[in-house]
Image (cartoon, rainbow, N blue to C red):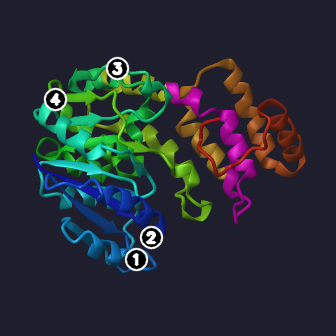
Amino acid sequence: MKFTIAIPTYNRNQILKNNLRKLLTQVTSDCKILILDNCSDIPVLDSISDLIKEFSDVDIKVIRNTYNIGLTANILRCFEMCVDPWLWILGDDDEVKDGAINQITNDILKYNDNHFISYAWDKPSFERRNDIINSGVDELIDSFESLGVILFISTGIYNVEKVIDKISYANFFQSTYAPHLVILFMSLGDTGKSVLSSKQIVINKSSETPVNLRWDQIFIYQLILLLRLPLNPTSILKLRKRLVELTKLWTISHLIYTLVFTNYKDNKRPLVLYNDIIRSFFYLDKRVSSRIIKLFGYIIIRFPGIFKPMMNFLYKLIKGRYFDANNSLRI
């Protein structure tokens, strides 16, 4: 069973090259590599031409977009350009585990009638003892440990033939920053099968990516737009519950710290972002303590110079380190 390994990338040529070398040593005749260069300043093909020559037996193709079409649009290009039955979208800064391709090949044969296979990658999903098979979108939403587990794009393998007809929804909902979840949720319906695997195929190395090469994680709060998907009311309620869980993981306190300690060119931007995210995302958090924090947050972000030294001291006292706004949204 053939599958495509699609790698959307932009301006991370050296990081991509380092990870690509490890991937290429695993590639078999069952898969090909497709690199979607989102108009990087230095063409990716120029940076990896020596690797292509070294691994001349590997089917590898580089497509360079005429313009930078954006992160989510480039992800969707992976679906559009895939001509094989299955697709693995691999982040350019994620390290492939030894034996990953063999694992995927075996699982595709085993779960050939499924829409999607999601592999483990963080603490909660590492606790899976066996593969979990779900039927329909409701069962999947109930089964995954947190929305973040399946949000990590490098851990998902898609049966293109079963999901591609819902790509129009994914294009429409690009602003969710999760078009891959949109295409999945819309395609599963009541009976589509998916698997939560107990195995691991990649190591998340995004924290090692230089700050200037990361995308702005603050926009991940736009996941709330998933609630506007034309799913049945029961599915939306279940999805809402999982988003409420995120408000306890990506806390208001952490949002306040992130906005205060991030350097923005426009001094008004942190307050604008705070008001927008509170109204559009954290309205889900109904706890009294959170409501109080919301009010204090407005004052803190309005006068960061007054509160920043105190916040630095408190974070160091509690966490034993200074706050780094460039890290994950998780506190």
How far apart, in angstroms, are the residues tagged by discs 4 and 2? 37 Å
Estimate the x, y position of residue 218 in percent, counting from the top left: 57, 49
Position of 12 relative to 125 (above/below): below
The one nearer the camera, 62 or 234, is 62
In this figure, what is the number of numbered marks? 4
Disc nearest the viewer among 1 and 3: 1
SS at circle 2 = helix
Q: Residue at x 18, y 37 (%)?
A: 106
How far apart, in angstroms, are the residues tagged by discs 3 and 2? 38 Å
Position of 179 relative to 215 (above/below): above
Whether pointer 1 and pointer 2 mark residues with C-beta atoms closer than 8 Å, the reply is yes
Residue 111 visible in rendering: no
- Tag 2: residue type? Asn
- Give left or right: position of 71 versus 251: left
Which label is found at residue 142? 3
Local crowd at mark 4 within 10 Å, few (<14), some, or many (≥20)?
Answer: many
Numbered range of the magenta stretch: 245-271
Which label is found at residue 192? 4
Which label is found at residue 13? 2
Q: Which tag, 4 or 2, sits closer to the chain's start?
A: 2
Q: Quadrant of the N terminus?
A: top left
